[in-house]
Amino acid sequence: MSNNQQVLGTEPVGKLLLKYSLPAIIGMMVNGLYNVVDRIFIGNMPGVGPLAITGLGVTMPIMTIIIAFGMLIGIGTATNISIKLGQGKKKKQKNF
C-alpha cells in the first residue's frame, strides 16, 4: 500500500478535506478576481466600454453552463473510475 493510501485511510477527515480543498478554493478565488479585473479594464475602454460589458454579461452565463456540463462529465467519470479501482474491478474501469 502506498503512502497516499495510508494517509487517506488514517488521517482525520477534516484535515484531509482542508488539505485537498484548499487549492480548489484558491483557484476559484483567483478566477473570480480575474473576472473582476477583466470587467474593470473592459469597462474603461474608450468608446466601446458599455457595449463590451453588455457582451460579457450576455456570454458569461452561456460559458458558465458549458463549463458546468464539462465538469459534470469529467468529475463524474473520474469518480466512477476511482470507485471501480477501489473495488478492484479493473476490467470495468478500462471501458471508460
Image (spheres, rainbow, N blue to C red):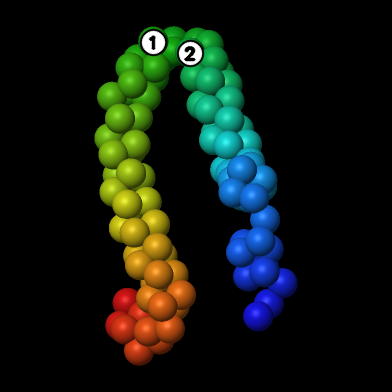
Mark 1, other Cα within 10 Å: few <14 / some 14–19 / many ≥20: some
Q: Residue at x 63, y 70 (%)?
A: 5
Residue under label 2, please give it: 43
Question: Tag 1's secondary structure?
Answer: helix
Mark 2, other Cα within 10 Å: few <14 / some 14–19 / many ≥20: some
Three-letter code, disc 1: Pro
Residue 74 seen: no
Q: Residue at x 62, y 62 (%)?
A: 8
**Residue 48 place in picture, x, y as percent:** 41, 14
State the separation of the CA atoms marked 1 and 2: 6 Å
Three-letter code, disc 2: Gly
Mark toward the start of the polypeptide (1 vs 2): 2
Q: Residue at x 32, y 84 (%)?
A: 92
Instruction: Identify whether 44 is placed above or below 32.
Output: above
**Residue 4 place in picture, x, y as percent:** 67, 68
Residue under label 1, please give it: 50
Q: Residue at x 72, y 72 (%)?
A: 3
Q: Residue furthest bottom?
A: 91
**Residue 22 place in picture, x, y as percent:** 63, 41
* The C terminus - image quarter: bottom left
Residue 78 seen: yes
Would residue 59 appear left or right of 20 to someone viewing this image?
Answer: left
Would residue 29 appear left or right of 55 to someone viewing this image?
Answer: right
Q: Residue furthest right?
A: 3
Contact check, label 1 and label 2, Cβ < 8 Å: yes
Instruction: Identify whether 68 is placed above or below 47.
Output: below
- Depth check, front residue: 43 or 65: 65
Would residue 32 appear left or right of 58 to someone viewing this image?
Answer: right
* The N terminus - image quarter: bottom right
